[in-house]
Image: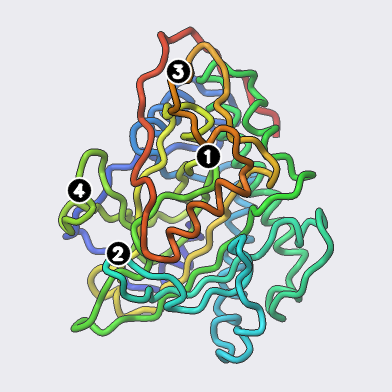
Amino acid sequence: MPTPTAFAQVPPFPDSVPTAALPRLALSSLLSGDQTESEALFQASTDTGFFLLDLRGVSEGETLLGEIEKAFGVSREFYESSEEEKSKFPMFPSNLGYKPPGHTKIENGKPDRCEIYGLSQDDILGTTPRRSNPPPFESNRPLFTDCMKHASSIASTVLTHLSTHLALPPTTLSNLHSLSRSSASNLRFLHMPPQPRSDAQTSLMGHTDNGSVTILFNILGGLQILPPGLEASETTNWRWVRPEPGCAVVNLGDTMVQWTGGVLRSNMHRVVPPPGVQAECERYSIAYVLKPPADARMERLKSGRIPDVEGNEDEMGQCTYTEYHARKSAGAREGKNLAGSQGGRKMKPRVDVRVEEVKV
């Protein structure tokens, strides 16, 4: 999350709510090749697919924290503009552009209460022809160029460690997300106004992410995850994620499950009104969503640890990512989660791996 300065401006997260016991990993340790930290990363990626990543203590992480704090200011400026102004930039099928509240549904069929702007990585980095964005984003292109490059680099560090533990060449997963190839990767700016306590509901329905890696920054609570094996329909089964200064919440998406035959995990999560007195505040969050190139094939990777395909279980393997994404997004707009939590499958017998230093 952003720096302690930003946290000091909002009410504290309450201690009275049930929270998820997410491991806290250090980017500095992953970059230096710490074996214990690497193994903890892989364990978290197969258990819940969620972990906290402490970005402090290393220049790349500290820089990204500063950029994200500035990006929150840009987000507030955009969401303070009129509905007429925001509606000039409608969301495309790739989830880029502006989604107003109510454009998608939650589990009970009611309209959601979350507005989102998706800022295209291709556009900002110049991979595709330039597109028009709202003025607050256009006037901060240099900020978002740096922000996306740093977030992508940190995601690549995570992918390098995962590749190694999957007995793949270390650059396998990161090479599948080259910045030079067109993709729907983006920065997502989310805004959720306070809700009346007498009519509070889920802001963003329970779902799994359909990309590869999400790096989330938020200051207020509201994010909840569903522990493995529990039913989503029971409200008491969900666990709050406590925001922590200097840390991002990192989670894996469905493509990582698909490519690894279910070894890695993509876990259900949702957004509800913040707990306690935080519910009276405007909730903003920013997520860097790393997705494969549009033409990437979704067939299972082969290694000594990834289970072999059996029968028809790899039915999505011949799809491109664009086709894969379209299938899930269509269901999400109607308030339907097509898969639920996925992954956590047992691997082939373990082989010894060593994690070398990751060069910045």
Q: Which residue is mark 3?
A: 307
Please name whichever residue, 130 or 355, is drawn nearer the observer in this view of the structure: 130
Q: CA distance from mark 1 to mark 3?
A: 16 Å
Can the viewer see residue 139 in this picture?
yes
Q: CA distance from mark 3 to mark 2?
A: 33 Å
User: Which of the 4 quarters of the picture holds residue 4?
Assistant: bottom left
Q: Which residue is mark 2?
A: 107
Q: In this picture, is 32 found above or below 235? A: above
Q: Is residue 306 left or right of residue 111?
A: right
Label 4 neighbour load within 10 Å: few <14, some 14-19, many 20+: few
Label 2 neighbour load within 10 Å: few <14, some 14-19, many 20+: some
Q: In this picture, is 169 found above or below 226? A: above
Q: CA distance from mark 2 to mark 4?
A: 13 Å
Can the viewer see residue 56 in this picture?
no
Amino acid tagged 3 = Pro
**Local SS, label 3:** loop
Q: Position of residue 83 (x, y in %)?
A: 55, 89
Please name whichever residue, 103 or 171, is drawn nearer the observer in this view of the structure: 103
- Looking at the image, which residue is at 47% across and 8% down? 351
Q: Position of residue 123 (x, y in %)?
A: 76, 61
- Looking at the image, which residue is at 46% across and 75% down? 103
Q: Which residue is mark 4?
A: 231
Q: In this picture, is 154 found above or below 83? A: above
Amino acid tagged 4 = Glu
Which mark is on residue 255? 1
Q: CA distance from mark 2 to mark 1?
A: 23 Å
Amino acid tagged 2 = Glu
Precedes in sequence: disc 4 or disc 1: 4
Please name whichever residue, 208 or 325, is drawn nearer the observer in this view of the structure: 325
Precedes in sequence: disc 2 or disc 1: 2
Q: Position of residue 150 (x, y in %)?
A: 67, 48
